[in-house]
Image (spheres, grey):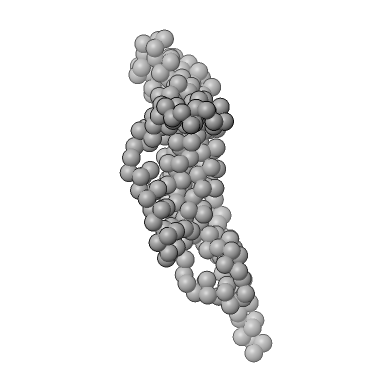
């Protein structure tokens, strides 16, 4: 292995990190916005709400992300209505096609993750909130979703890390993120081993940073939860002593 070429490649490929992170976080934001209401619909006892969401998640979780990306990038351009609409201004750009594919795919997985967390919330918590006079929307916003998010945080962290690695597929539609730059550099140097090792090290570094962030977030949330529980116990003792 040429160590000099390896480090030189890492420096060159580092210029693709901003695009990789932009794709990752933009897709995360869009998928989160989509998945929260879809998760509540998926967890609903009404089939009119749950079945359409189940069909959506089944299709996007059951087909490869690469196929979905190709269908959006190559397929939508074959539809005359889209080509003549204002959407074509965005969809003719590979970045927006990747963002759409990653967001829809990520939302399908995140919806199922949050659905499990929502259904795992104890009914006693909901009944207590109802007894306090909270509206259904307030219960979802203040009770159900915070508890669900805390319980599924490790699974959600895995989904985020998977999305970072999935952005490498953007190179197949000409975007020059880390993997795209790697393929370009290989065609110029004919040294695939060192270059792809360098790309792997960059992805590994991003994964390590994200894993550390979610670990710190999980620790902080658990600490806050214990503090709230202790305060609740103190309040109960005070009430009992007063009685």
Q: Classify residue 77 by image quadrant.
A: top left
Can you say whether 35 is above or below 146 in the image?
above
Q: Position of residue 68 (x, y in %)?
A: 38, 35
Residue at figure coordinates x 52%, y 71% from the top left: 126
Looking at the rendered image, the quarter that the N terminus falls into is: top left
Q: Position of residue 159 (x, y in %)?
A: 43, 44
Residue at figure coordinates x 53%, y 42% from the top left: 30
- Name the residue nearer the viewer: 164 or 87: 87
Residue at figure coordinates x 55%, y 59% from the top left: 146
Q: How many marks?
A: 0
Residue situated furthest bottom in the rendering: 243
Looking at the rendered image, the quarter that the C terminus falls into is: bottom right
- Name the residue nearer the viewer: 31 or 68: 68
Residue at figure coordinates x 56%, y 27% from the top left: 89
Q: Classify residue 221 by image quadrant.
A: bottom right
Can you say whether 77 is above or below 33 in the image?
above
> Can the viewer see residue 212?
no
Can you say whether 190 is above or below 210 in the image?
above
Q: Position of residue 111 (x, y in %)?
A: 45, 51
Residue situated furthest right in the rendering: 242
- Name the residue nearer the viewer: 206 or 85: 85
> Can the viewer see residue 23?
yes
Q: Position of residue 22 (x, y in %)?
A: 55, 32
Q: Is residue 41 left or right of residue 241?
A: left
């Amino acid at each position: 292995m040429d160590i000099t070429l390896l480090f030189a490649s890492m420096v060159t490929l580092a210029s693709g990190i901003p695009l990789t992170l932009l794709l990752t976080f933009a897709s995360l934001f869009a998928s989160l916005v989509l998945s929260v209401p879809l998760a509540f619909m998926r967890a609903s006892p009404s089939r009119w709400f749950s079945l359409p969401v189940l069909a959506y998640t089944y299709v996007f979780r059951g087909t490869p992300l690469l196929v979905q990306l190709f269908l959006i990038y190559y397929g939508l351009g074959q539809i005359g209505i889209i080509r003549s609409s204002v959407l074509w201004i965005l969809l003719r750009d590979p970045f927006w096609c990747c963002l759409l594919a990653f967001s829809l795919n990520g939302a399908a997985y995140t919806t199922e993750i949050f659905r499990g967390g929502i259904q795992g919330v104890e009914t006693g918590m909901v009944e207590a909130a109802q007894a306090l006079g909270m509206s259904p929307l307030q219960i979802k916003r203040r009770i159900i979703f915070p508890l669900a998010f805390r319980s599924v945080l490790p699974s959600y962290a895995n989904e985020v890390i998977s999305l970072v690695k999935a952005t490498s597929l953007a190179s197949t539609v000409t975007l020059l993120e880390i993997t795209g730059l790697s393929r370009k550099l290989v065609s110029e140097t004919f040294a695939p081993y060192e270059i792809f090792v360098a790309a792997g090290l960059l992805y590994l570094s991003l994964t390590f940073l994200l894993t550390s962030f979610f670990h710190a977030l999980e620790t902080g949330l658990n600490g806050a939860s214990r503090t709230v529980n202790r305060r609740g116990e103190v309040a109960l003792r005070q009430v009992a002593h007063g009685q």
